[in-house]
Amino acid sequence: MHSTAFVTDIVIGLFALFILHRLSRRLYRKYPPGPPKLPLIGNLLQIELKAEWVTYHQWALKYESDIIHLSIAGLSVVILDTLEAVYDLLDKRSSIYSDRPRMVMLNEMIGWSWAFPFRSADHSWREQRRVIHHEFHPKAVTKYRPVELKAVHNLLKRLHQYPDSCFIGEIILTTIYGIAIKSSDDPFVATAIKAMEVISLATSPGQFLVESLPILRYIPAWFPYATFKRQSIQWQQNAIDAFTCTFNAAHQDSNLSVLRSFMLEMMYHPEVQVKAQKEIDIILKGERLPLFSDIDSLPYITAIMKEILRFSPVAPLSAPHATNVDDVYNGYFIPAGSVILPNTWAILHDPKSYHDPFTFNPERFLKNEKLNPNVLDPFAVFGYGRRICPGRHMVIDILWITMASILAVFCIQKTHESTEEDANPSHPLPFNCRILPRSSQHLKLILEN
């Protein structure tokens, strides 16, 4: 009798110590600053679902901190607003900041768990990462250049024949999978565009309450207010299409978005086009199309590419990381399991790194008509730490040769239908522009290559 009571007392005591430990861990640790939290739901009602990276940056400025803490119905979210914070955590401490969050909606309900970028950093992922890095390191990707050139030349013909078909989906698909794209409304391209829409929505903190309360995934689709459940069912087919097409959707639509931004900025900055074409003409003399061997001779083209990536980053918020243990940074407590969101948009618009950051200006990357190595490269768009995009070197190759080739032979002009809304980076395709060969000699180059 007494022994039973004694054991019970021990169990109750241990349980009480456990609760006290959990409470003290939460109450006496100093979290990073952030907006005030409501009971239970935390900052759920304060999360912007459109251009949230701007709101996060404004909070960072308000609280004078390069890291911000949010609680979304119990889910710990940490925003990294500066490159220094990103480097300190995602690079220097990559061993504990390289995981992915659970992503209930994306992986478990929609079915994207097969995709390499969204998988947990387990042994299998590390092995796959090693193989991919070996295949796509800077020297290895040069073997794809002949295929990329052919695809770009096909793109030039398509732009001449169908000036509203501004896409380069063929490049990625032909290069990696040998899939021939026939038109701008090809189902492979449509799959990519839809996939990126779904991924963007499903990985946005605060978008779906099921991320904080995973048990909600089991409620039936007919249940009142279960819109997220019905959406997940609709989006499952897209994940299946992407998988069965052996399709790298993330890189596909990234290139589509970068090219779209390029066309828009050239349309609204004709002076940049003129300077780029003068540089091209000095080297090519209108006798041939650009080659990869021209990269060092065309620094202004490289500067344009860098400014496009900086000015209109494809993913203003980088893909979320997750911590696998408790951590402390600059005196702030970051609990295990936190979602870590690097604010790439804020990093690439930091006036400490880029003077007048909200002005489109390729010249910022040049000094004495050469690339300035002292200006921060905008390659934060490719991610951070161990989660950096392994195919970034090939993507850079593709973007450079595509921009150089288009500028070499075309003039990109506004039309009467062009509007200020076209210049909005969030405005969807298609947009109005006029793409004309620069001369009969340039048209000949388009048709003969």
Image (spheres, rainbow, N blue to C red):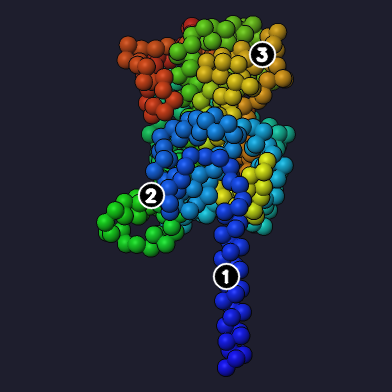
The label nearer to you, 3 versus 1, is 1
Give the class, few, some or many, for how many residues have Cα within 10 Å of label 2's Cα (few <14, many ≥20): some
Give the class, few, some or many, for how many residues have Cα within 10 Å of label 3's Cα (few <14, many ≥20): some
Under tag 3, what secondary structure? strand
**Closer-to-camera residue (52/327):** 327
Q: Which residue is mark 1?
A: 16
Q: CA distance from mark 1 to mark 2?
A: 45 Å
Is residue 9 at all visible to an observer of this figure? Answer: yes
The label nearer to you, 1 versus 2, is 1
| Total numbered labels | 3
Amino acid at pointer 1:
Ala
Identity of the residue furthest to the front in this view: 2
Amino acid at pointer 3:
Leu
Residue in view at x 62 percent, y 90 percent: 3
Under tag 1, what secondary structure? helix
In the rendered structure, the answer to whether residue 347 lies left or right of residue 225 reads right
Residues at marks 1 and 2 touching, judged by CB atoms closer than 8 Å: no
Q: Which label belongs to residue 366?
A: 3
**Residue 6 placement: quadrant:** bottom right
Q: Check the picture and name the quadrant holding the C terminus.
A: top right
Residue in view at x 55 percent, y 33 percent: 63
Q: Which residue is mark 2?
A: 235
